[in-house]
Image (cartoon, rainbow, N blue to C red):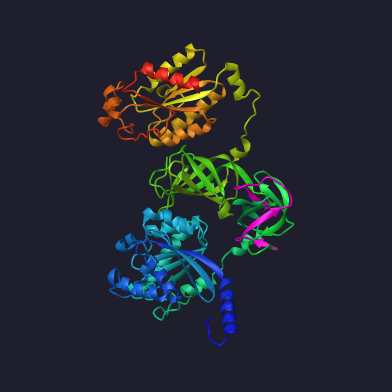
Amino acid sequence: MALEVYGSSDLIERDIEAYLEQHENKSLLRFITCGSVDDGKSTLIGRLLYDSKMIFEDQLAKLAADSKTVGTQGGALDFALLVDGLAAEREQGITIDVAYRFFATDKRKFIVADTPGHEQYTRNMVTGASTADLAIILIDARKGVLTQTRRHTYLAHLLGIRNLVLAVNKMDLVGYDRAVFDRIVLDYRAFATEIGITRFKAIPISGLGGDNIGSRSENTPWYEGPSLVEHLETVEVDGTARQAGPLRLPVQWVNRPDLDFRGFAGQIAAGSVKPGDAVRVVPSGKTSSVARIVTAGGDLDEAVAGQSVTLTLADEIDCSRGDVIVSADSPLEVADQFEATVVWMSDAKMLPGRPYWLKLGTTTVSATITEPKYEVNVNTLERLAAKTLDLNAIGVVNIALGKPIPFAPYAESRELGGFILIDRMTNATVGAGLIHFALRRSQNIHWQAADITREAHAAQKAQQPKLLWFTGLSGAGKSTIANLVEKKLHALGKHTFLLDGDNVRHGLNKDLGFTEADRVENIRRVGEVAKLMTDAGLIVLTAFISPFRAERQMVRAMLPEGDFIEVFVDTPLAEAEKRDVKGLYKKARAGQLRNFTGIDSPYEAPESPEIRIDTTKLSPEAAADAIVERLLKA
């Protein structure tokens, strides 16, 4: 809408207000561009920004200057430089990060995410796709359907994107040959059909030349469909379906500005709400009704999916961050075990049994993953057996949580069915997941209440249950010292039990090897057994290498605070290797023993153990005395 100068400030103001109102009321489409490396994703977005006049004069001048120095078009405008902002991207000519850009036409507003093409950055593509309504799959007309084309299509479909555009780019480099276009569309359709995609829009384009981008091109008279922008402006976005469903509002925070106001703030994930509506808080199940819908601009008579609001309730009921406010007659499921698809996004492989944080909506809870049911080969769609997941791998797993949470299958709700997995030690995001359904065992298995409590068992034995967790390299002296400590405690009349690493592997864990995944499971099982023994009132001693901090922290979290005592038997590798009572180091050095801690498998030393024993300075007897003295003071 062009602004004309009428000579009256009132008229100009009204014209500006009308323009802004028109812009504000436009619908918003979020979309991603993806495909293989150098298919022209950044160039396409740059062209969209250029054609929609969303580039300021100073940006255009800088683009012209950069195009001459680092461009790839012989000094002509290189539109990719508008998006490839990272220095590393400009040097390599590839996209690494997810770049978000805004532009608008007369009919609609757009937010586009330029996602990486390299397989090693698939995790970035997942990030961009997680909020998108549409995906543009670019294909270089000279290369056809490639591995990353299939990978990104599979991921886009997996993440719930149902509007797909197949943009066959660089048609100018194949002479705008219709046969080339038709062949690529046919190949792509064959793959798309295999994974359940029933429809997509195919458009022949040239991002560099602008063919079929903003308007139909004379170079493709055989193409009778819309230009890319025309399609983006008119494609239907399924926003009404979210608003038509039952209310789902994940509580982000409890708003308490003063003693007289208590509201529950969050963004409505689905449905709509009005004052007076009956609602239920899950997982508690408490019911009430909506008193007010509060926003910064004042109270609303109705709020719908996508709006951020604060609800006040008619009754004082318990509700906190992580809970979900739902329609009273349409509650969410609540469970603590699920089947889910996981996209692994970390260089460190997924280890079954290792504890992670799972964040779903506003809820964060402890989670462990079982061995994958299968891994998906996105190139062949085969289901492959797998014991773990590596970077960019996609697998179907079972997940167990530390407590039940409200959820919806991802197919019904991205917000309540999509989650991320976080490493508990580094706080790095390591995976993204999509819930399929709750496992029946989560509904069928319950804790059986026992009349004789942990405290009663401890009182009967006149002692405080403890878990003394001895950790250190093989040959450090863990078992020797732990055995001496138990003898001294037994002589003092204490009720104890020693769980030794080698002994446990003869029975409980005889099915486990020494891979990282098996070591994690070994410690998980031992931790569960040790917890049961402390519940019986015992002082439990364990002697395990337990090389990973995450698993030692997992066992610590199983017990009441203060009942886990980490004893680091600190022996330098050279000293442990010199002792080599069992001859294990010699075998490991000779390559006869794989995954041996300290040689070809890491040992993560405790950072702040309750007790540290330097075996180069203390004898086993003296170490045992020091540990018993420390325990009796606790």
Q: Is residue 246 visible?
A: no
| Residue nearest the observer in this picture, 114 or 252 | 252
Task: Measuring from the top left, give residue 64's x and y in whole percent.
Answer: 33, 74
User: Looking at the image, which residue is at 41% across and 73% down?
Assistant: 47
Q: Is residue 122 magenta?
A: no
Q: Is residue 316 magenta?
A: yes
The image quarter containing residue 297 is bottom right
**Magenta residues (range):** 301-326
Q: Which residue is at the far top? A: 491
Task: Measuring from the top left, give residue 503's x and y in whole percent.
Answer: 42, 21
- Work out whether 75 lies above or below 504: below
Q: Which residue is at the far bottom? A: 7
Q: Is residue 265 visible?
A: yes
Give left or right: position of 97 versus 434.
Answer: left
User: Looking at the image, which residue is at 48% across and 21% down?
Assistant: 631
- Work out whether 496 lies above or below 315: above
User: Looking at the image, which residue is at 57% across and 69% down?
Assistant: 27
Give left or right: position of 267 versus 47.
Answer: right
| Residue nearest the observer in this picture, 58 or 413 | 58
Task: Measuring from the top left, give residue 349's x and y in whole percent.
Answer: 40, 43
Q: Which residue is at the far left? A: 590
- Work out whether 478 lies above or below 42: above
Q: How many marks?
A: 0
- Work out whether 282 lies above or below 107: above
The image quarter containing residue 365 is top right
Task: Measuring from the top left, give residue 612's x and y in whole percent.
Answer: 39, 27
| Residue nearest the observer in this picture, 72 or 235 | 72
